[in-house]
Image (cartoon, rainbow, N blue to C red):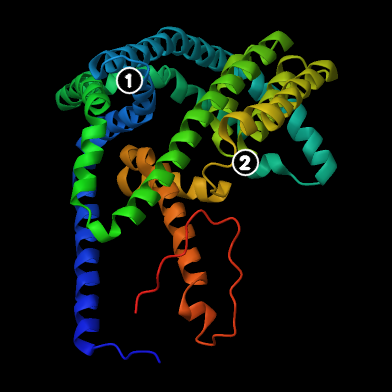
Amino acid sequence: MQQVADPLQEIARFLRRLQWAAVVLFLLWLLWLLSPIMTPFVLGALLGWLGDPLVDRLERAGRSRNTAVILVFTAMALILFLFVLLLVPMIRDQIQTLVTALPSYRGWVLTTALPWLEARTGLDISSWLDFSRLFELLRDNWERAGGFATAALGYVSRSGFALVAFAANVVLLPVVTFFALRDWDLLVARVASLIPRAQLPTVTRLATESSDVLGGFLRGQFLVMLILGAMYGVGLWLVGLDLGLLIGIIAGLLTFVPYVGPASGVILGCLAALVQFGDWPHLAGVLVVFGVGQLIESYWLTPKMVGDRIGLHPVAVIFAVMAGGTLFGFLGMLIALPCAAIANVLLRYAEERYTHSRLYAGDNAGILVEPDTRSRYPREPEQE
C-alpha cells in the first residue's frame, strides 16, 4: 500500500528545490555580469581540463606532476606558436587575394551567373538586387578593414582600455592554463568533498560520463577539423584555385556541424573554380577533392577519432553555439558545447529514471518494464 506523503515534508521539499533554483538563477546572472572578464579564465580552465588526461598519463609513466605539467604546457604553447606563425600570415595573404579578385567575381556574377539564372527562371533578378552596389560595398569594407587582424589591432590601438584588457587576457591565459593543469585533480577532489555523501555515486557517474563524452568529442573533433582543413586546402591548391587554402580552412572549421562544412566548401570551391577558370575540369577537380575528403572523414576520421561521443543533433549544436553567443558573447560560445553535452547526459539519465519510475510503469505489479539494454546506469531504489 502506497504511503501518503506528509504535507510538511512536501512543502519542505518544494522550498529546497526553490532555493536551488534561486541559486542557479543567481549564478547565471553573476556569469552574465562577469562575462567580459571571464573569457581567459574559462578558456584556461578548458585547456587545463583537456590537457589533464595527458598529464595523468605522464604521471603514471613515472614523471612527477610538475614535470608532466611543464611538458604538456610547453607542447600546448608550441602548437599555439606554430599556429600563429604559419596560419595567420597565410590567412592574411588569402584575404588580400580575395580583395584583389572581387572585381572578377563581380564581373562573373553580372555577366554570366545572372543572365543564366534569368534565362532559366524568367525572373528579372537584377532589378531586385543591385549586385554592382553590393560588390562595391563589400570591397570598400574589406579595404578599409584590411582583414580581420588589422581591424582588431586598429580597434585595440584606438582604445586604451581595450589595449589593457587585451594585454591582460594575453598574460592571464597561459597563467590560468598552467595552474589549471597543475591543480585540476585537487580542484576535482575539493568539489567532490562538498557533494552530499548520499548523492556522491550518482554525481560522480554523471560527471565522469560528461567529461568523457565532451573531452573525447572536443579532442577528436579538433583533430578532424585540422586534418580536413589541411586536406581540403592542399587539394584545392593542387587544383589551381587561388583561394583554395582559405576555402579549405573555412570548410575544415565548419566540419563540427555535419553537412554544413562540406556543403559550404563545395559551394565556395565551385564558385571560385567557375570564376577563375570557367571550365568543367577544374569544377570536377573541386568535387573530387571534397568527395575524397568526405570518404576519408566518414569511413576513417570520424569513426576513429570522434565516434558518437556527444550525441547532439547538428541543429542542437548550432542552437547551443548561437544561444551561448547571444546570451554571454564569446564566453557563451566557449561554454555552449560543454553545457549542451552535460545537459544531454542529464536528460538521458532523467529519461532512464523516468522509464523505471512508478509514474511510468504504474502501480500494477503485473506490468514488467523491459530494461533498456543501452543504459549505462543501474536502476536505483525508488524514493518513497
Give the x, y percent position of residue 245. 59, 15
Look at 44% across and 25% down and name the residue there: 141
Front-lying residue, 109 or 162:
162
Look at 36% across and 37% down and name the residue there: 334
Work out whether 346 lies above or below 104: below
| Disc on res. 247 | none
Q: Distance between the residues labelled 2 and 1?
A: 63 Å
Q: Where is residue 24, by image quadrant?
A: bottom left
Give the x, y percent position of residue 27. 21, 53
Q: Where is residue 9, by image quadrant?
A: bottom left
N-term-proximal mark, 2 vs 1: 1
- Is the residue marked by circle 1 packed among few (<14), some (14-19), or many (20+) residues within 10 Å? some
- Is the residue marked by circle 2 packed among few (<14), some (14-19), or many (20+) residues within 10 Å? few
Give the x, y percent position of residue 324. 38, 46
**Which residue carries the number 1 mark?**
59
| Disc on res. 129 | 2
Work out whether 58 lies above or below 313: above
Q: Point out the image quarter for the C terminus.
A: bottom left
Left or right: 187, with 306 as reference point: left
**Which secondary structure, mark 2?**
loop
Q: Point out the image quarter for the N terminus.
A: bottom left
Front-lying residue, 286 or 290:
290
Look at 59% across and 85% down and name the residue there: 366
Which three-letter amino acid code belongs to the residue tagged 1?
Answer: Glu
Give the x, y percent position of residue 60. 36, 21
Look at 50% across and 46% down and name the residue there: 317
Left or right: 342, with 375 as reference point: left
